[in-house]
Amino acid sequence: MQNGSNNFFVRLLLTALAVLVTAYLLPGVEVTNFFWALLVAGVLALFNVTIKPLMVIITIPITVFTLGLFLLVINAVIILLASAVIPGFYVEGFWWALGFSLVLYLINTIFNNLASN
C-alpha cells in the first residue's frame, strides 16, 4: 500500500508541474504559483473521480453519436469547474479550457513516461 500512495503523490506533483508548464504555454490560462498548481492537480483528480463519471454516464447517447468527441467537452467543463473553484487558477473560456485539457494531457504523458523510466 505504501508504494501506491507514493505513486499517487509523485503523479500529483508531476501533474502540478504539467499544469504550470501548460499555463505558461497557453496565454488564456493563468496559475499564480506552484501551490495553486498543486491544488489544481488535486481538484482535477477529485473531479475526475467524482463528477466526470457521472457526466459521462449522463451523456452516453451524445458521446456515442459524436463517436466519443463529446468527452473532450466534458474534460473542458471539468477544467472550467476547477477554474471556478480555485482562486489562483484562471481559464479565459471554453476553448482555452479545451486547449488546456489537450496540452495538459500531452505534457502529463511525457512527464509520467520520463518518471517511469
Image (cartoon, grey):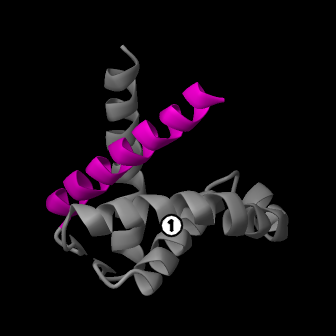
Residue lying at 32% horizontally and 33% vertically, measured from the top left: 111
Image position, residue 97 (x, y; %): 40, 70
Q: Is residue 5 above or below residue 85?
A: above
Is residue 8 found inside the magenta-colored segment of the image? yes
In this figure, which residue is indicated by the disc labeled 1? 43
Residue lying at 61% horizontally and 56% vertically, measured from the top left: 69
Residue at the far front in the pictured view: 2
Residue lying at 37% horizontally and 41% vertically, measured from the top left: 108
39 or 73, nearer to the observer: 39
Residue 59 occupies which quadrant of the picture?
bottom right
Tag 1: amino acid: Val
4 or 46, nearer to the observer: 4
Specify the segment rendered in magenta. Answer: 1-26
Image position, residue 65 (x, y; %): 77, 60
Whether residue 96 sits left or right of residue 56 in the image: it is left
Residue lying at 46% horizontally and 78% vertically, measured from the top left: 80
Image position, residue 109 (x, y; %): 40, 35
Residue 84 occupies which quadrant of the picture?
bottom left
Identify the main secondary structure in magenta: helix
Whether residue 113 sits left or right of residue 26 in the image: it is right
Position of the N terminus, as image quadrant, is top right
